[in-house]
Image: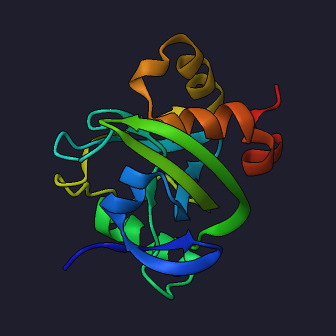
Amino acid sequence: MMDMVPTWVNGKLTPVEKLEAHQRGLRHKAVSVFVMRGNEVLIQKRASGKYHTPGLWANTCCTHPLWNEKPVDCAMRRLDEELGITGLHPTHRDQVEYRADVGNGLIEHEVVDIFIAQADSKLKVVPNPDEVSDVQWIDLYDLTAEIKRRPERYTPWLRIYLQEHADRIFGTLLRV
């Protein structure tokens, strides 16, 4: 079954196949989650088999909601599917919109509900190898500095979130 994403076509929300939405650069719904442990954020390296941005580091997880799926339910579903993370309660932080070239002629034009979930040191992370090749906890300030030094290692959306929307997402966590 094809992955259908809620997409605006002629001003109306319509289900469109995910790859087609990216090929045509259509504006569609998305969800991103940042799992935090104090000032550290859990980031993931995208699996090499992903159809765009393989092998790049991204936020904890990101995806597209199913048709009629609530954003928070989508966030919890993908935390489990991508990283085996259960039992967290993501908090909605904001909604942002971005448009980015993700390579191979694909464009993401996404309206993203962004969530933060707090974890403790006992959090069990079991990455799905079809989705994730590696994970890392990194201080949010250090991540921001590393993205400035080596942007090519990170997904376009993670760079956009931290460069353009950090205050809206993280509040005072990034202030030194």
Q: Is residue 99 visible?
A: yes
Q: Is residue 74 above or below residue 30?
A: below
Question: Relative to 71, does residue 146 appear above or below in the rendering?
Answer: above
Eyeballing the image, is 26 above or below 153?
A: below
| Residue 17: quarter of image | bottom left
Q: Residue at x 25, y 53 (%)?
A: 131
Q: What residue is at 57 percent from the left and 49 percent from the top? A: 37
Residue 49 appears left or right of 3: left
Q: Residue furthest bottom?
A: 68
Residue 115 seen in the figure: no
Q: Nearer the viewer, residue 143 or 27?
A: 27
Instruction: Report the residue at 56% width, 27% height from top.
Output: 143
User: In the image as oriented, which residue stretches furthest toward the top?
Assistant: 149
Q: Place residue 10 in its image quadrant.
A: bottom right
- The image quadrant where one finds the N terminus is bottom left
Q: Position of residue 176 (x, y in %)?
A: 82, 25
Instruction: Say above or below: 126 vs 42.
Output: below
